[in-house]
Amino acid sequence: MAEEPKEIKPGFQNPVAGFGVTFKAMFKKRLTEQYPEQKKTTAPRFHGRHQLNRHPDGLEKCVGCELCAWACPADAIYVEGADNTDEERYSPGERYGRVYQINYARCILCGLCIEACPTRALTMTNEFELADSSRANLIYTKEQLLAGLEEGMVDTPHSIFPGTTEEDYYRGLVTEAAPGTVRQVAVSKGEKEEDQGVDA
């Protein structure tokens, strides 16, 4: 015959026993991180905000192929390619990404777009503070994603290094802008206001 459970009698120990976990935690080392005053260092290969990279002379690596947009499982990337001209050149190849948008309201930061990029134009940075009160502000444009200019670079558009081809850029033979390289006049407006791009 099974024993009946003993009846718990009300007493002083019952409420105190319930706070046992609380009292133990009071004397342990605090685990709270004082964010955002104290920020933790992220891993080198952390999946943060995207960045559109440049060649050492400042030309853009993106060729507007749209492979990143096709690879995106969240449909968060919108790319519109255009043709380069000798008077207005943004990349060493025939085409460049005229419009490039990433919607961070949709992006899941999975990195599939990085793997799909054939020119290593797209990488991920360690920036993770992307929160915003407006959905419209979560759609990052090409100007926001494009890497900054470093020493030896000239802002686009400008001509390719004299005597080189597109293949020379990908072989790493171009290490800086040619002396005397100046920025060309931008005739195309890039991302226009009427470009809808990625829906919010």
Image (cartoon, rainbow, N blue to C red):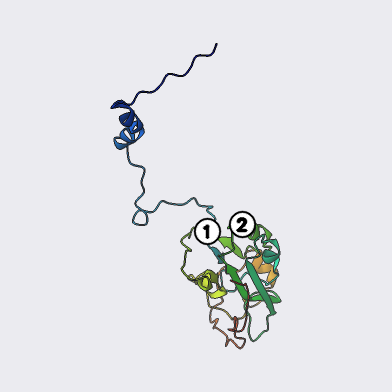
Q: Closest to the observer: 54 or 192?
A: 192
* Amino acid type for the residue under numbered disc 1: Gly
Of all residues, the one furthest to the top in this rendering is 1
How many marks the image carries: the answer is: 2
80 to 45, vertically: above or below? below
Q: Which residue is mark 1?
A: 48
Q: Quick one: label 2, few (<14), some, or many (20+) residues within 10 Å?
A: some
Q: Quadrant of the C terminus?
A: bottom right
Q: Secondary structure at mark 1?
A: loop
Residue 98 horizontal/vertical position (percent): 63, 78
Mark seen at residue 102: none
Residue drawn at point x = 52 percent, y = 58 percent: 48
Q: Closest to the observer: 197 or 64?
A: 197
The answer to whether residue 146 is visible is: no
Mark seen at residue 111: 2
Residue 83 horizontal/vertical position (percent): 70, 80
* Amino acid type for the residue under numbered disc 2: Gly
Residue drawn at point x = 30 percent, y = 30 percent: 16
